[in-house]
Amino acid sequence: MAANHFNYLRSMGEVSIASLTETVRPAMVHGLLPYMETLGQTLTNLKGIRLSVEEANLAGNVHEAVLGSRLASLSEIIDPHSSRGPVEAFLENMTNIASRWNGIRLLTDMQKSIAAVMTQNRLLRGATMFAEVAEKERAYLAYLGIDQSMAERIAAQFAEHGEVVRKVRVAGTEKWTDEVARRTYRAAINKDIDSIITTRGVADTPLFANTPTGRAMLQFKSFALASHQRVLLRGLQEDQARFVGGLIAMTTIGMMATWLKGLSGNRKGDPQFSDNPGWWIAEGLDKAGIFSVPMELANTFEKATSFNPIKTPIKAFDRGSAISQKNQNRSLLGSVVGPTGGLIDDATRVMGLPKQIIDGEPVTQAQKNAAERLLPFNSYIGIRQMLRYVINPQQ
C-alpha cells in the first residue's frame, strides 16, 4: 500500500486534464439537447440545480470533495482491511493533499452534479409518463431496476412530495412514505451517475485485482476496466447516434487534453497537427476512455515492439512517426507490471548517477527523466512546469 500511495504522489498531478473528456459523458447518455439545457440551468436556475444535487447527496453521491472515494478506488490506494503504520499514515495524508492539489475532487463533483440533474429529470419523467414514453425509455428504466409497478409507485410519491423548479424535477425523497420506492429511486440515481462518470464497482475488476500483487500491477488501470464495462458495453447497447456523437466529442476533448499535457510538460517532440493529424486523432481517441482496455493493451504492445495495432493504422498517412504520448515517460517494465515496476526500473537507472557525475561522464536525458519521475509531486502544477521548463527541459 505504501508503494501505491507513493506512485499516486508521483504520477497523478495531471489527472484532471485526463478527466476532461468525461465532461461531455452526460450528453452521450442523455442526449445533447438535455445536456445543453442543463448547462443553461446552472446559470439561470441555481435553486433547482441545488435542490437536485442535494437529492443526489441524500442518495450518497456527489461527495468526492469530502470523501475522495472514487479516485481512491481507481488508484488502488484504499484498503479497509490493511493495517496502517506511521509511514502509511503519512503517505495517506500526503495523497489527501495531492487530491486537492490536482483538482480532481472538485472536477468530479462538478461532473457528477450535472449528471445527477439530468439523470433525475429523465428518471422522473419516465416514471410519471411510463405509459406514454418510447420503448427505449422503458429499457432505460429497466436498466436502472424500475419496472412499471415501481414506476407507478415512484410517480405517486413524486406527485405528492416532489416539485418542479423551472423544468428541474426535484423528487423530495426525504418526505416519501414508500420506503421501497425511495431506496429504489436512490439506487437508480447512483447506478446511472456512477456509470456516466466512471466509478469502479465490485464487479468491474477480477478477483486478482483485490490481492496485494494485483493492486500493484493494476494500479491506475482500474479505470480502464471500469470504463470498458460502464462506458463501452453500455454505449453499444443504447442509442447509436448518441454513442457516435459522444465518441466524436470525447475524442475532440481528448486531443485538447493531449495538447494541454504537452504544454504542461514542455514536450517539444509532439508533432504538428498539419503534418501528423492521425497521431492527434489517435491520442484523442485514447484519452476519450471509451476503448480503454484495447487501448491499454495496444499501448503496452507498442512499448515492446514499436507497433501499435490500433494507432498505427490511424497514422498511416502521417508524414512522420511518433510514439504514443502515454509511452513517452514510462518504461516497458512499468507498462507491463504497473507503476511499482516502473518505480523500481527508474530507481535502478538513477543509482549509477553519482558515480557517472564523479567520473565526469555525461548524464543522458533518459536518466534525467527517470530521476524526475522518482520525485514526489513531480507531475503537479507548479512543480511540473519548474522541472520541465527550468531544471530539466526536454531535448
Image: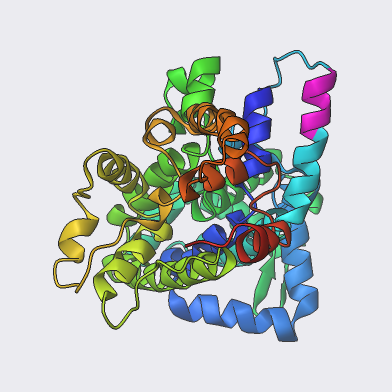
Residue 176 shows up from this direction? no
What colour scheme has been applied to the protein in the rendered image?
Answer: rainbow
Q: Left or right: 277 with respect to 138?
A: left
Q: Nearer the viewer, residue 317 or 240?
A: 317
Q: Is residue 25 above or below residue 249?
A: above
Question: Residue sitting at 33 percent across and 79 percent down?
Answer: 273
Give the image quarter of residue 123: bottom right
Residue 377 locus on image (x, y percent) = 71, 47
Q: Nearer the viewer, residue 174 or 348?
A: 348
Q: Is residue 68 above or below residue 84?
A: below
Count of numbered marks: 0
Residue 168 shows up from this direction? yes
Majority secondary structure of the magenta segment? helix
Question: Residue sitting at 22 percent across and 69 percent down?
Answer: 320
Q: Is residue 275 above or below residue 196?
A: below
Residue 78 locus on image (x, y percent) = 67, 28
Residue ranking furthest to the front = 359
Q: Nearer the viewer, residue 335 or 219?
A: 335
Question: Residue sitting at 68 percent across and 41 percent down?
Answer: 9
Residue 172 locus on image (x, y percent) = 76, 58
Q: Left or right: 249 with respect to 6?
A: left
Magenta stretch holds residue 306:
no
Q: Nearer the viewer, residue 33 or 306?
A: 306
Residue 215 locus on image (x, y percent) = 53, 24
Question: Residue sitting at 48 percent across and 37 percent down?
Answer: 222
Q: What is the magenta range? A: 86-92
In which quadrant will I find the N terminus? top right
Give the image quarter of residue 228: top left
